[in-house]
Image: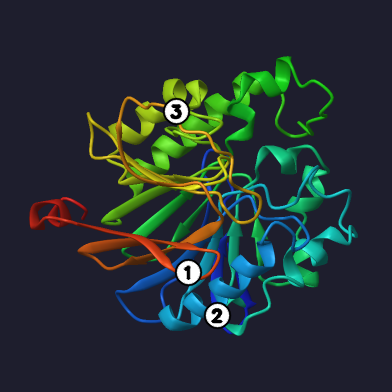
């Protein structure tokens, strides 16, 4: 059964799937046929501080220039400890009252970060938040289908073993997740099946945690062990994440996969740079965000700082034989 929901002048189809063995699929086709434009931001929810408001202003400017279709969040939507409930004023103070430009009054597709899990996760996932701000579409794991590209949104905090075994003073809300092993096994199976069914020329996986990173958190061993093989086996083009508060591009030395970090929505400047086994193409330690434009044959990534300056521009294309094999 399909349920139709109108969001800011766009019609988004939620496919209400009957089986737990499939990820929820949201269809959001671009306004301009064959050309998608989005913004990607992460690690932002600090009530306007640490240049969050400045980044939001520049997102509005770039969003207007590109006439974007939607925004993707790589998680840590509310610091320090998520939301306390559906009536938490932080929802307005860190989201609705910050991202006010008309160009970004589009659907926002959000995954959860570790700081979100420190609060009331079920509140952040509650559809009642869409009654407060209809842009806010947050789920654990799901797919956004935009024709020529599929975004596979993956819930990565449960992968981090330390959050379960050594949480320290933090409390993680594992309701509807525990036991960990079963949750991760089911998620990986669902993701693998969805990737294999996808006929989109471009496949991007979005999660909160880093897979490859030269910044403070570095690589995430659990993702390299458990998630990376699924991505490589299914020809994923890029893994897009937050968690490290920076902008970076690392390319794999043994596959076509690219690791893209956009986690610089507010607090940044960690002054950390670690060596990495793969190829570091770009790294910026300050605040900012990313734009992504996708056609059938090309994907263009641009990183911007808090002043709207384009810091890095990278494009990749699909060969004709790759496009034939997508269908």
**Alpha-carbon distance for marks 3 and 1?**
38 Å
Front: mark 2 or 3: 3
Q: Residue furthest top?
A: 165
Q: Which residue is mark 2?
A: 10
**Residue at the image point whose x is 81% and y is 67% from the top:** 92
Q: Which residue is mark 1?
A: 28
Q: How many marks?
A: 3
- Between residue 26 and residue 257, name the one nearer to us: 257
Dividing the picture into quadrants, the one containing residue 158 is: top right
Q: Which residue is mark 3?
A: 274
**Crowding at label 1, few (<14), some or many (≥20) Cα neighbours within 10 Å?**
many
**Residue at the image point whose x is 43% and y is 25% from the top:** 224
**Alpha-carbon distance for marks 2 and 3?**
42 Å
Question: Pointer 1 and pointer 2: residues touching (CB < 8 Å)?
Answer: yes
Query: How far from the left and from the top, in percent, is residue 22?
Result: 51, 43
Query: How far from the left and from the top, in percent, is residue 271?
Result: 55, 38
- Between residue 93 and residue 4, name the one nearer to us: 93
Please tell me which of labels 1 and 2 falls first in the chain. Answer: 2
Query: How far from the left and from the top, in percent, is residue 208?
Result: 56, 42
Dot 3 lies on which element?
Answer: loop
**Alpha-carbon distance for marks 1 and 2?**
8 Å
Above or below 76: residue 222? above
Q: Residue furthest front?
A: 271
Query: How far from the left and from the top, in percent, is residue 236?
Result: 32, 43
């Amino acid at each position: 059964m399909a349920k139709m929901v109108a969001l800011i002048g766009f019609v988004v189809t939620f496919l209400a799937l009957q089986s737990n063995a499939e990820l929820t699929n949201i269809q959001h086709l671009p306004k301009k046929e064959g050309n998608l434009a989005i913004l990607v931001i992460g690690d932002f929810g600090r009530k306007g501080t640490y240049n969050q408001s400045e980044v939001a202003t520049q997102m509005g400017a770039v969003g207007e220039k590109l006439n974007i279709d939607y925004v993707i969040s790589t998680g840590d939507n509310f610091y320090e400890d998520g939301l306390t409930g559906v009536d938490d004023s932080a929802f307005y103070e860190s989201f609705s009252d910050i991202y006010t430009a008309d160009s970004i009054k589009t659907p926002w597709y959000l995954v959860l970060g570790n700081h979100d899990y420190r609060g009331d996760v079920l509140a952040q996932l509650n559809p009642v938040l869409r009654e407060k701000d209809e842009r806010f579409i947050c789920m654990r794991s799901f797919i956004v289908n935009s024709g020529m590209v599929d975004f596979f949104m993956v819930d990565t905090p449960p992968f981090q073993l330390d959050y379960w075994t050594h949480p320290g003073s933090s409390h993680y809300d594992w309701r509807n997740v525990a036991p960990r092993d079963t949750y991760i096994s089911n998620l990986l199976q669902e993701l693998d099946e969805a990737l294999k069914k996808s006929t989109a020329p471009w496949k991007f996986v979005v999660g909160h945690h880093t897979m490859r990173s030269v910044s403070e958190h570095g690589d995430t061993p659990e993702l390299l062990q458990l998630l990376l093989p699924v991505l490589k086996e299914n020809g994923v083009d890029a893994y897009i994440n937050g968690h490290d508060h920076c902008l970076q591009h690392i390319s794999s030395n043994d596959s076509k996969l690219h690791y893209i970090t956009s986690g610089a929505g507010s607090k940044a400047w960690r002054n950390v740079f670690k060596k990495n086994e793969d190829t570091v193409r770009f790294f910026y330690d300050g605040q900012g965000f990313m734009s992504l434009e996708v056609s059938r044959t090309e994907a263009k990534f641009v990183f911007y700082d808090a002043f709207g300056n384009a810091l890095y521009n990278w494009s990749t294309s699909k060969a004709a034989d790759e496009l034939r094999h997508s269908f």
